[in-house]
Image (cartoon, rainbow, N blue to C red):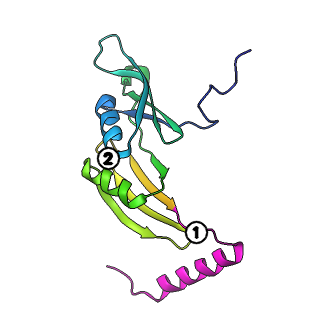
Amino acid sequence: MARPIPEGLRAVTPALTIEGASEAIAFYKAAFGAVEEMRAPDPSGEKIWHAVIRIGDSAIFINDTFPEMGASPNRSKLWIYTSDVDALFNRAVGAGATIKMPPADMFWGDRIAMVGDRFGQEWALAQHTQDLSPEELQRAQEAEVAKHAAAPAKR
């Protein structure tokens, strides 16, 4: 009997439908160190029916748009946890990602940056920097809320 979840995959696997999947895969290799595991081109050889890339220990499915088959572009936000968020942010920006938010320390114990790609995807780059007890997290959250409440409104 076949395994219900294929080897190397998780119960939830992101799937991106992108106009220009081949170019997106090349970008993800340059920006995030993605490894292409497989590619199934359509009969024309110009588009991708199905591809699998891996970033760290996570697989992502990617295919081109095929409107005639109901495969329209989708937009997603994906998180990548890494051991050096600043280096990954610089790599992604160097590869052509647009800056949404430069790296910053968050009250919950992560350092986060946000970038976008020309294929409509948004990427949160994260590094866990400290473990907080529930009480410490609550105090940090309250301090963050108070800080924002005291700040003048931006126009």
Is residue 139 within the magenta segment?
yes
In x, y percent, where is residue 64? 36, 27
Residue projecting furthest to the right: 1
Residue type at numbered disc 2:
Asp
Residue with the mark numbered 2: 117
In x, y percent, where is residue 118? 28, 44
Residue 137 in which image quadrant: bottom right
What's the CA distance linking mark 2 and mark 1? 29 Å
Q: What stretch is highlighted in magenta?
A: 128-155
Residue 107 in which image quadrant: bottom right
Q: Main secondary structure of the magenta part?
A: helix
Name the one closer to the observer, 75 or 53: 53
Quarter of the image where the C terminus is located: bottom left
- Could you tell me which residue is drawn at 44 percent across and 55 percent down? 124
Q: Residues within 10 Å of mark 2 (few under 14, many from 20)?
A: some
Name the one closer to the observer, 135 or 148: 135
Name the one closer to the observer, 71 or 31: 31
In the displayed structure, 56 sits above or below 150; it is: above
Circle on res. 142: none
Residue type at numbered disc 1:
Gln
Q: CB under 8 Å between callouts 2 and 1? A: no
Quarter of the image where the N terminus is located: top right
Residue with the mark numbered 1: 130
- Could you tell me which residue is drawn at 39 percent across and 58 percent down? 114
In x, y percent, where is residue 144? 53, 80
The local secondary structure at tag 2 comes to loop
In the displayed structure, 144 sits above or below 121; it is: below
Is residue 107 within the magenta segment?
no
Q: Earlier in the sequence, mark 2 or mark 1?
A: 2
Q: How crowded is mark 1: few (under 14 residues within 10 Å), some or many (20 or more)?
A: few
- Could you tell me which residue is drawn at 47 percent across and 58 percent down? 126
